[in-house]
Amino acid sequence: MCGIVGIFNFGMKEKINPGLLIEMRDEMFHRGPDECGIWISKDGFTGLAHRRLSIIDLSKAASQPMSNEDSSVWIIYNGEIYNHLKIRKELIGKGHLFKTDHSDTEVVIHSFEEWGINCINKFRGMFAFCIWDDKKKELWLVRDRIGIKPIYFTVNNGRFIFASEIKSILVDKIIPREVNKVSFYNYLSFLTSPAPETMFKGINKIPSGSYLHMRKNGDFKIYKYWDVLDFIKPVEEKSEEEIISKLLEDLETSVQYRKLSDVPTGVFLSGGIDSSINAVLFSKNSREVVNTFTIGYEGENPSYLNEFIYAKKISDLIGANYHEKILNIHDFIGFLKDLVFYQDEPIGDPVCFPIYFVSKLAKDNGVTVCQLGEGSDELFMGYPNWQLALKMYKLNSIPLTGFFKKVTLLLLAKTGSKNRYAYEWLRRAVNNEPIFWGGAEAFFEDEKKSLLSVKFQKYFKDFSSLEAIKPVLNSFTEKTDCKSLEQSPLQWMTYLDLNFRLPELLLMRVDKMSMANSLEARVPFLDHEFVEYVMSIPQNVKIGSGVLKYLFKKAVKNILPSEIINRKKQGFGVPIYEWFFKEFGGFARDKLNSFNSHTDFFDKKYIDVLFRNNSAQKIWFVLNFVLWHERWIENIKSHEYMETGK
């Protein structure tokens, strides 16, 4: 895993400043502390730089930037191609010569020579890479199918700049720092900035499953090269037992692929069903004892119960080296300064905090690669609120009059329920909008209008965050219509989160926090072939009569202890609510009061309402933006953190 950065002066106004490129590269030293490299074209108008976290082929021959034999094609690459040995063998059969022993980077560049940009269809893995064709003066930026690895870019004054992290782009002082107002509004809904935009006006990101092609005159276009709906087909397996057998076989294949490494590996283990099956399959055929890593919190926290007992049970089951760490409120507050630095743009999920520290725990114990269970809940309906959404879809299908729905909506509004799911979902149903807007929603549309200042209320008077998901909705409707695919509510919910919440929130938090510790995180549930198969399974088979993870639980019942399978769902979390009544509450109030005294984003009275209602989670969502604005827009690099609540 690595960090990449590059500049293409297509306007040919000035040659690359090597010092600037090196400074941009080293701003993300954490992504690649093992080695670094730089290349500038002979004409001086193109420059590529790389920071390396050595994982596959640790030799100097695998260093980057890397070129083909005649230096006509160059690559900088972040990621892993798990089937690279198979592709290498095919390329050797076609006459390609390799200088490295088993570098997957070199496989990518020879694949591009052989098949052009269509080579990406052969890759099984996670990646964000740039290929520069020095003869044609053309550039390609590619992000993997699921969006596990990010890549950002901006165009400014005849220069195209890209990087693995926004902070590297901002090293260039002429890049303006301005809030993207639409992204700010959407963040308040989704806890993240939907691609292709970011919270910085003028800085964009490549969407998942897409690539950018830029010609020598600076013209560029972004293409969508993978959509899971294009690969859905009727399952060949006839019975539930056959489907389960196929599921386990494919998942084990994915886990085994992701063990590929020349450095020590391990598993993040919460004690839930997803991380537990991951650990068990990971331990299968392992030559060495597996390392597992678990995070918990100090004291009694009813909103988030420690899972050590379950994680330890699975670790004992597979004979693992078990590691745990207990965090507290002081760890949390002390980390906030680093949090906003590593996030680049606001990621409202507080789970960034434990992901950072479980990554640090692994790295401190000599491990550089870890697997984790992201994606299973989206594929198999693991969230209770999804269960509620499906019930709402079912109720909405009953042929009631629009008048009855509108009357019910008015009654809910009068009882003060505007900020509840029941009201918002009914409002969407009344307006013929999709009920489900994603697996993570912070503030609904009505509440956002109360939260925002008068200025922003006017700016967004006729705007809704529905606009952010419309492209996904249109794609889903068109593809399911023309291909006669299942249009079930669950299919829509999974499809939306695969395109939206997973790449820009869940996987983004994993990438940022793991790479902050120079640790690579791998997600076997999101192997694209596994995803394609699971998405092909009909809703009625996948969830039975509406039971959370019905099919998946049946699949693992002979592998995991029943107490792991049948325990109540508990997501990876943070006891924000309990901490709100300690130092965190006072810290948040001071920060928001200070921010509101010199900015005009939020309504001060409504912020007070959130505090009076002890709305700890919502206050955290706002605070995350405030801390980001302070660090990246106001450029205040030192925060005042309290020892006793001030």
Image (cartoon, rainbow, N blue to C red):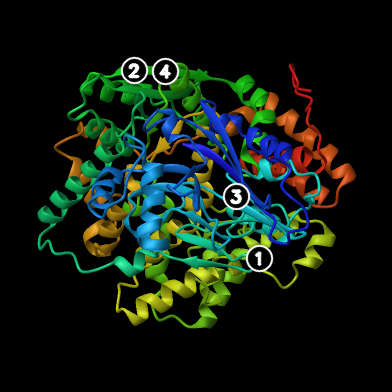
How far separated are the C-alphas under marks 1 and 2? 52 Å
In the picture of the structure, the residue carrying the numbered disc 2 is 322
Q: Bin the neighbour count of mark 2 within 10 Å (Cα to Cα): few under 14, some 14-19, many 20 and up.
A: some
- Taking depth in this image into account, of 368 and 491 the one nearest to the observer is 368
As measured in the structure, the alpha-carbon distance from the residue carrying label 2 to the one carrying label 4 is 13 Å
The CA distance from mark 4 to mark 3 is: 33 Å
Secondary structure beneath dot 2 equals strand
Left of 301 or right of it: where is 391?
left
Disc 4: which residue: 366
Question: Disc 1 marks which residue?
Answer: 218
Residue indicated by mark 3: 191
- Rounded to the nearest angstrom, the CA distance separating label 1 from label 3 is 33 Å
Describe the element under mark 4 as helix, strand or loop: loop
The disc labelled 2 sits on which kind of residue? Tyr
Q: Is residue 102 above or below residue 467?
A: above
Tell which circle, 4 or 3, labels the residue nearer the N-terminal end: 3
Choose the circle earlier in sequence order: 2 or 4. Answer: 2
